[in-house]
Image (spheres, rainbow, N blue to C red):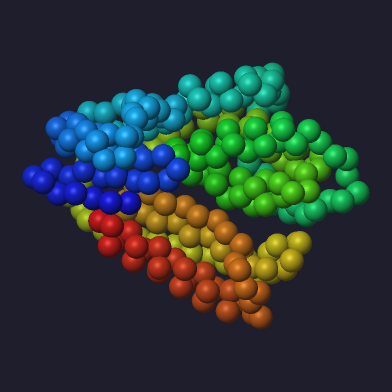
Amino acid sequence: MFTKHVDDILIVQIYVNIIFGSINEKLCKDFESCMEEEIGMSMMGELTISLDSKSRSDEIFINQAKYTRELIKKFGLEDAKISKTLMTTTTKLDKDEQSKNINIKLYCSMIVSLLYLTASRLNIIFSFCCLCFRFQSCLKKSHLIAVKHIIIYLQGIIEMGLWYLKTEQFSMMSYSDADYAGCRVDKNSTKRNSSIFRKLPCFVVFQETKSRALSTVEAEYVTAGACYAQVYWMKYSL
């Protein structure tokens, strides 16, 4: 991510495509002309990821209600009984080699659809990563059921989103937690970090640790270190 300060600020993010934006339209036009002249870049238009926003002078509300409805309809789950939870407390998936194979194309389509939804639904990130994302090389019926359960849960919270209030308070709080040997496949620990900026949720991550911890204390220590690194990066960016 790159930033340019000329009275106002221009932010440029490079990830496959180049995404840029500014509250000053002239900075955007200048950058567009520069890229077109230097590397022949062609504009794809305004960025859209089915993100709806409603703003006032002192608040902004972001959600993906329309996208969620389309997602539920796409996979034919409109008539399914709404689930009140993302998953049961006892749910821990593994490779499940004895179970039936499933339609890989369907599963991957569900995963990609849910991935875009995490932009405004931070509450599904843990279940999404824990249950679904790590088993794409050995897909079984139990994995598909878990993904469908998440989509069915979304029916009950279609209008949910992120509500940001204008505030002068400049503070950040972060939380970390570790599940010692939580992965049933390789017994690695899992780490969870979340950050609250100005009392507003801004970052949630769930990952399996790359190294195997020898104790609960070590797992918590590694997770806390990763959390600090993320906070330091966010502080630097701000």
Above or below, 232 against 151 in this view is: below
Which residue occupies 55% across, 39% down?
115
Residue 22 can be seen in this image: no
The location of residue 180, given as percent across then percent down, is 65, 70
The location of residue 32, given as percent across then percent down, is 24, 34
Q: Nearer the viewer, residue 106 or 15?
A: 15
Question: Would residue 41 appear left or right of 161 to someone viewing this image?
Answer: left
Which residue occupies 62% across, 73% down?
211
Above or below, 87 against 224 in this view is: above
Which residue occupies 44% across, 66% down?
227
Q: Nearer the viewer, residue 68 or 20?
A: 20
Tally of numbered discs: 0
Which residue occupies 22% across, 38% down?
34
Residue 40 can be seen in this image: yes
Q: Nearer the viewer, residue 196 or 98?
A: 98
Above or below, 238 against 224 in this view is: above
The location of residue 181, given as percent across then percent down, is 69, 69
- The C terminus is located in which quarter? bottom left
Question: What is the residue that sits farthest to the left in this orientation?
Answer: 7
